[in-house]
């Protein structure tokens, strides 16, 4: 914005220019003028209910709330005028009338905005002598959140978040006047995928974390910034540990990715890292067919000897590996083992990512997450984002509900997006390409306008979508839009970028001869045509859409090496089992779905002698006569920059966390005590505060405990780096001539499946706070299909395929006729035992045929 378009105002005698319409409290903060507040939050609309931010403005008869007052030209503001100071002190006195003296037992103590602002702005004593208002203490409103109504100051943050941001208003203000309180609606559980955000934004400790309850004081914690290791959105987080145990995870703000929020899976799903079931040392199978401990040297020596004699080797990588791991695996397979039979698509087997990214790049249409907020129309083709990419769901909801974009949902079943979608196109199973093609025809809804962003992700495990990709890119190209490709896991995009695909090399170079994909690799192993199979974080028995094939592959005579965190079903069939490290124990990077690279910092020690997969690959290469001279994270990135064209410009210093410039406390305005500093250590990733503690100045962010109001939103972000786009000479890959796999006609119903947010996956099932939240498996049918089968809501149905069967509870839903939906990998059901053919038969549980 030009200087002429800015307004000029004066705050506490200092002149400042700002964009017209900006909120006064934000403009003041940029001048390092702190205005106290409780209800205000930059991620939500202002309501001005706490009245703590009252300031004096010349020409106004009364004090004005800084959080709800837009700046205007010529405005003169005084935040320290006597009447404003009296108002702040008076409001704090009112708030403290009923607030209990719980500080010694409150989890918020030490990082409490009410505590801090009382010291800074409140009265030194209380004039109130009557009994305080009391409620039942420690009311568990969900499995994750505890409510203490006595501490609540009615700032409405939790209510507003649930309503405005998450769109699931489970928590409400009830009653009136002095009896007003926060409760869940109709006393139902706070059953939100985003409930943990209300804990972090609560300014007083009225909402606290059940898993973290009474675990630690903030000054006893060490912390490190990181990235969520679950889905491909790549939410920035901070991990916090007491001793060597992870005890808390909180959101770090990044306007490019997650704004201020994370989902409960990312917030509470860290416990798996401290599980007693973690692998701690290399294991080899002895002559008695039992695993025995061995050293890394002996394990790698035996693997190298076997691989030197192997003529055919397959490599499969799981989706939770870092970008460095991906490069090491790609380099090991292609340069040392001499094989192109490697793939990183396990659950998302056959998903044409290279095609989608290649086509969209050729059309110049790669989208970012923030493009959703600038979109006029969004088309969604893929799984339910609320289950698989929860924070992307929040971004989509914000774009549609708040920013008024149009949303077109193309799906064979009802998704969470349908509630606020402008248009819903219910397709037959496997017919998405035809529906997408119709969007560019004359019958396109007239109110679907650009800028256009088309989002695609693999919607059903084992189902290839090449023809849909062609249709989507055609749609984006004809309407001048962009394509956002949404792979499922935190490491998926990094694996693609580093060429861990049979038809793609690192940097999006196309090999002359492609290798075999995951299915072909497993088929070769099952047929005894593979000498060795290397699995890096890939539990193929649990995740590959054909469990029978995966099992036969591991029992087909190939020499199997598994690198894993846990002794999974796949690991149990290995010849050599090598322990890996969890995300909080390592330095590394994840590349999110928009190809944004973000840094993980180590915080805790890995158990035993576990190693990073990149280090395993480098050691194995050395054992086979190839010394890469990798000794650190920085060495790996030197190699990546030298060999991967799209990543040649990456500057690791821009990714690293740094000790921030000392700044006043985000709530109280106190200056930090430099005596708390324990020094800054320069490392390969740049300077980082040594012994940084979340209760002392050198906390990641702005020198004070992590909360939503950390000063300087722009300055404290770690925005990450987006590498160069895939090269394009204007040529497009040939059009797909295949129909979508699994859509063939046949007996029974087309089987649709997809992940739920909580499932029986390895990380969730090993996380004590989440594993009990996974739903009981069910089958969802169209009401007309259910009627034909004489099935009703809640009945038991028998689902059969591939000689297997499962008894599941019936749910009636908006599913395409001729199709059923069964969630993937829920407790007690391995859906991948049913998915091989893509079709199932369904009968009543009490049918004679059952």
Image: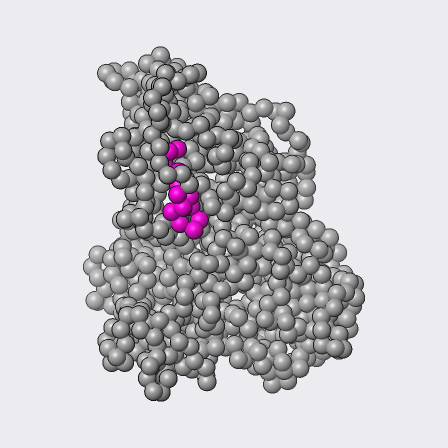
Quadrant location of the C terminus in the rendered image: bottom left
Which stretch did the figure color magenta?
139-151
Q: Is residue 666 left or right of residue 573?
A: left
Residue 633's x, y, as percent? Answer: 67, 51
Residue 818 falls in image quadrant: bottom left
Looking at this view, name the residue that lies furthest to the front. Answer: 131
758 and 25: which one is in front?
758
**Visible residue check, residue 380:** yes
Indicate yes or no whether the magenta region holds residue 145. Answer: yes
Number of labels in the image equals 0
457 and 188: which one is in front?
188
Residue 157 falls in image quadrant: top left
Q: Is residue 802 left or right of residue 279?
A: left
Quadrant location of the N terminus in the rendered image: top left
238 and 622: which one is in front?
238
Residue 387's x, y, as percent? Answer: 40, 59
- Residue depicted at 66% across the width and 79% down the height: 558
Residue 422's x, y, as percent? Answer: 24, 57
Reply above or below: 735 against 259.
below
- Residue depicted at 49% across the width and 27% down the height: 665
Residue 648's x, y, as percent? Answer: 60, 52
- Residue depicted at 58% across the width and 59% down the height: 321
Reply above or below: 29 against 375.
above
Q: Is residue 729 left or right of residue 500?
A: left
Q: Is residue 660 left or right of residue 824?
A: right
Reply above or below: 206 against 72.
below
- Residue depicted at 55% across the width and 25% down the height: 672
Indicate yes or no whether the magenta region holds residue 813. Answer: no
Q: How is the image coloured?
A: one colour
**Visible residue check, residue 623:** no
Looking at this view, name the residue that lies furthest to the top. Answer: 82
Residue 261 falls in image quadrant: top left
């Amino acid at each position: 914005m030009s200087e002429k378009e800015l307004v000029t105002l004066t705050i506490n005698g200092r002149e400042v220019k700002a964009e017209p319409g900006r909120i006064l409290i934000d403009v003041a903060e940029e001048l390092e003028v702190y205005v106290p507040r409780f209800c205000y939050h930059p991620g939500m609309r202002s309501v001005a209910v706490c009245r703590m931010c009252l300031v004096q403005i010349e020409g106004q008869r009364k004090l004005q709330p800084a959080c709800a007052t837009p700046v205007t030209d010529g405005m003169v503001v005084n935040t320290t005028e006597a009447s404003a100071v009296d108002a702040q002190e008076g409001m704090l006195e009112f708030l403290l009338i009923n607030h209990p003296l719980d500080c010694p037992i409150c989890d918020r103590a030490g990082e409490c905005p009410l505590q801090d602002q009382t010291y800074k702005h409140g009265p030194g004593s209380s004039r109130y002598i009557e009994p305080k208002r009391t409620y039942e203490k420690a009311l568990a409103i969900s499995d994750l959140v505890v409510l203490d109504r006595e501490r609540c100051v009615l700032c409405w943050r939790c209510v507003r978040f649930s309503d405005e941001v998450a769109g699931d208003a489970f928590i409400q203000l009830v009653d009136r006047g002095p009896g007003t309180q926060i409760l869940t609606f109709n006393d139902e559980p706070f059953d939100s995928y985003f409930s943990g955000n209300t804990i972090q934004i609560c300014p007083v400790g009225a909402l606290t974390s059940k898993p973290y309850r009474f675990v630690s004081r903030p000054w006893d914690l060490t912390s490190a910034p990181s990235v969520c290791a679950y889905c491909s959105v790549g939410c920035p987080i901070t991990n916090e540990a007491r001793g060597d145990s992870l005890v808390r995870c909180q959101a770090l703000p990044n306007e490019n990715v997650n704004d201020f929020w994370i989902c409960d899976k990312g917030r509470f799903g860290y416990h798996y890292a401290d599980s007693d079931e973690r692998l701690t040392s290399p294991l080899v199978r002895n002559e008695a067919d039992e695993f025995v401990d061995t050293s890394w040297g002996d394990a790698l020596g035996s693997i190298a000897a076997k691989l030197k004699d192997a003529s055919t080797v397959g490599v499969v990588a799981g989706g939770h590996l870092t970008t460095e791991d991906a490069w090491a695996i790609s380099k090991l397979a292609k340069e040392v083992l001499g094989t192109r039979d490697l793939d990183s698509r396990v659950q998302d087997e056959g998903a044409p990512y290279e095609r989608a990214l290649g086509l969209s790049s050729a059309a110049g249409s790669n989208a970012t997450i923030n493009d959703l907020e600038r979109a006029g129309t969004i088309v969604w083709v893929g799984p339910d984002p609320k289950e698989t990419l929860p924070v992307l769901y929040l971004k989509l909801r914000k774009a549609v509900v708040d920013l008024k974009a149009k949303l077109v949902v193309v799906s064979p079943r009802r998704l969470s997006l349908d509630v606020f979608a402008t248009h819903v196109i219910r397709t037959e199973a496997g017919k998405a390409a035809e529906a997408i093609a119709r969007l560019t025809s004359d019958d396109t809804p007239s109110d679907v306008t650009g800028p256009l962003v088309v989002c695609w992700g693999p919607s059903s495990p084992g189902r290839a979508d090449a023809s849909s990709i062609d249709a989507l890119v055609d749609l984006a190209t004809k309407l001048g839009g962009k394509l956002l490709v949404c792979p499922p896991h935190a490491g998926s995009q990094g694996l693609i970028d580093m060429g861990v695909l049979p038809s793609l090399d690192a940097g999006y170079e196309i090999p002359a001869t492609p290798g075999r994909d995951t299915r072909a690799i497993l088929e070769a192993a099952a047929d005894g045509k593979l000498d060795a199979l290397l699995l890096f974080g890939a539990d193929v028995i649990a995740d590959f859409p054909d469990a029978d094939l995966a099992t036969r592959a591991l029992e087909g005579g190939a020499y199997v090496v598994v690198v894993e965190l846990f002794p999974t079903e796949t690991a149990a069939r290995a010849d050599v089992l090598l322990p890996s490290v969890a995300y909080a124990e390592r330095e590394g990077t994840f590349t999110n779905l928009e190809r944004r690279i973000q840094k993980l910092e180590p915080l805790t020690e890995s158990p035993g002698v576990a190693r990073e997969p990149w280090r395993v690959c480098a050691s194995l290469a050395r054992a086979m006569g190839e010394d890469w001279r990798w000794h650190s994270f920085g060495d790996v990135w030197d190699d990546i920059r030298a060999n991967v064209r799209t990543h040649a410009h990456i500057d690791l210093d821009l990714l690293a966390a740094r000790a921030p410039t000392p700044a006043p406390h985000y709530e109280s305005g106190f200056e930090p005590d430099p005596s708390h500093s324990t020094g800054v250590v320069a490392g390969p990733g740049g300077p980082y505060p040594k012994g940084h503690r979340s209760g002392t100045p050198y906390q990641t962010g702005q020198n004070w405990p992590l909360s939503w109001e950390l000063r300087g939103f722009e300055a404290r972000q770690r925005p990450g780096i987006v590498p160069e786009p895939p090269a394009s000479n204007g040529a497009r890959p040939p059009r797909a001539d295949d129909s979508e796999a699994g859509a063939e006609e046949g007996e029974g119903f087309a089987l649709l499946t997809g992940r739920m947010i909580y499932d029986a996956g390895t990380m969730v099932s090993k996380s004590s706070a989440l594993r009990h939240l996974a739903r009981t498996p069910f089958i969802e049918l169209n009401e007309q299909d259910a009627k034909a089968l004489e099935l009703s809501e809640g009945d038991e149905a028998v689902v059969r395929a591939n000689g297997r069967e499962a008894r599941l509870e019936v749910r009636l839903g908006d599913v395409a006729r001729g199709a059923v939906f069964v969630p993937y990998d829920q407790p007690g059901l391995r859906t991948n035992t049913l998915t091989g053919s893509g079709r199932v038969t369904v009968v009543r549980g009490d049918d004679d045929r059952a």
